[in-house]
Image (spheres, grey):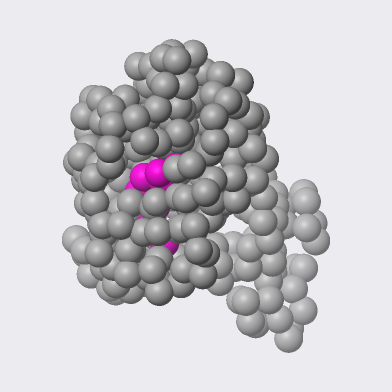
Amino acid sequence: MANRYFENENHTKLYQKYRMTAPKALVQRVINYLKEKYSGELELAVDIGCGSGQNTYIVADYFKKVIGIDVSPNQIANAVKANERTNVEFQLGAAEKLNLPDGSVQLITAMAAVHWLDLPKFFEEGLRVLSPGGVMAVYSYFISFYEWPRDPTKNEAIKKFYEEIILEGELGQFWSEPIRKHIFTKYKNISIPYDDFTRDDTFRNERHMSLTGMLGEMQTFSGFQSLREAKGDEAAGDLLDRLKNGILEIIKDDLSPEESNLDEIYFEEKSPLFLLLARKPV
């Protein structure tokens, strides 16, 4: 892996708790694409940059075995500890050098991970381990937007304020080059050099998210992690307070005096995804 984040133990626990999963419909789209030209058994899939296994478990519904691979020892330790699936295995390793036989894998996935990799080496390694007709699917999301169900007229103000916090100001300078190059452009400058390359932007993830969860999710971002490392816990805490107080200011008229528990103030989080697919020649 060309870049290393998400390895601090506390950070990996936040990642496990707050990071989103891919919609099942997106993974079904990947499986349908695979089956267009591959008719064999679905023996093995590999989930690259698996973190604590959010994406791995969804893929495991379709395969006899799935291996989640990550460079972070803490991520893998948390994943192994929480794993209750008999067909899922987690391994410490690099995406650019997989400990797998040639032609042994039918699907390689990477959820919110491929932008950290040495792409030419990863694509070359993928071609080695994929079986003929096997598929590489990489997908991620840019920035969530939060809808306030009690008064939708405030959604635009929430969106504007959240984007200002995430993309501009103090946090803005701490987004790394891979994030700016690939996530900010929604993978539009990435092309998988296999057959039948295609892109799908029709999916989005939706979930109920408390204000506590909104703050927790921001702490999983690599930019936030970099800010904390550079400026310390106090500066990181100030940024969280700014987000919390700004959101509360927007929705204050809809809250009763008794509503002080951030765990019980819920939004609808919606996250557009972008999916890239390609297959090894049959």
Q: Is residue 125 left or right of residue 159?
A: left
Q: Compared with residue 159, is residue 196 higher up or lower down, i.e. above or below?
A: above
Q: Residue furthest front?
A: 40
Q: Is residue 186 left or right of residue 169?
A: right
* Residue 15 location (% of width, % of height): 42, 63
Q: Is residue 72 left or right of residue 142?
A: left
Work out whether residue 85 or residue 137 is closer to the camera in this orientation and state it: 85
* Residue 70 location (% of width, % of height): 30, 53
Q: Residue at x 33, y 63 (%)?
A: 75
Residue 29 among magenta residues: no
Work out whether residue 128 or residue 43 is closer to the camera in this orientation and state it: 43
Q: Compared with residue 186, is residue 234 higher up or lower down, i.e. above or below?
A: below
Residue 46 among magenta residues: yes
Q: Residue at x 39, y 52 (%)?
A: 68
Q: Compared with residue 207, is residue 196 higher up or lower down, i.e. above or below?
A: above
Work out whether residue 246 or residue 131 is closer to the camera in this orientation and state it: 131
Query: In the rendered image, is residue 180 in sight?
Result: no
Work out whether residue 187 or residue 269 is closer to the camera in this orientation and state it: 187
Which range of residues does the magenta coloring cover? 45-52
Q: Residue at x 52, y 18 (%)?
A: 198
The quarter of the image holding the N terminus is top left
